[in-house]
Image (cartoon, helix red, strand yellow):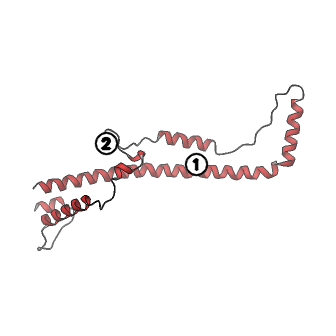
Amino acid sequence: MAMAEQDFPLEIRDPELDADELACRVRESVAQRRAEGAYGPDVKAIGPNSLKRGPGGELPGDYTGLQQSLAELLGQGHLAEPDFTSRVPVIGGLIVLVRRLWNWMSTKWYVRPLVEQQSAVNVQTAQLLGELLQGLEIDGQRLSELEARVAMLEARLEVRAGE
């Protein structure tokens, strides 16, 4: 079995094509395009910090802080009507009663639906953020797997270039 058949996952059955020459041409073309800047800026330099490699080359996969913030957000999603209190001695109970009656007459029937609507939006937002966090974790795993695969393929190309 020729070296080209071992290194590449595809089989070239055309006897007029030389797999080694084809691989060499692809490497040269990629090197030339990279030198010309055809592939754009280095994504490792411009990407978000959450996707940049640590000193050991690992991706930050610890989303504990985000998960904790999300849990707090979910816990605070439902808004509650304030309970009226008063620190005024003797007539404090009367002040609380007047506030409750005024709230019931003037705002409760108007504000309560708005509070419930906002609470629903808060909960939906927190749930969506949870789904996005799960997607981020999955994408981080996929990115690590793809980078490992690219490194393996680049190593193969370097071995073949040295032959």
Residue 9, percent from left and from top: 21, 62
Question: What is the quadrant of the C terminus in the image?
Answer: bottom left
Q: Residue furthest top?
A: 89
Residue drawn 33% across the image and 58% down it: 40
Q: Nearer the viewer, residue 39 or 62?
A: 39
- C-alpha span from label 2 to label 1: 32 Å
Residue 115, percent from left and from top: 72, 49
Q: Nearer the viewer, residue 110 or 141?
A: 110
Tell me the number on the disc at residue 109.
Answer: none
Circle nearer the viewer, 2 or 1? 2
Instruction: Determine contact: label 2, label 1, CB under 8 Å.
Output: no
Residue 12, percent from left and from top: 17, 69
Q: Nearer the viewer, residue 133 or 49?
A: 49
Pointer 2 or 1: first along the chain: 2
Q: Quadrant of residue 82?
A: top right
Residue drawn 31% across the image and 42% down it: 57
Residue labelled with disc 1: 126
Dot 1 surroundings within 10 Å: few (below 14), some, or many (20 or more)?
Answer: many
From the viewer's perspective, is 101 left or right of 45? right
Residue labelled with disc 2: 57
Question: What is the quadrant of the N terminus in the image?
Answer: bottom left
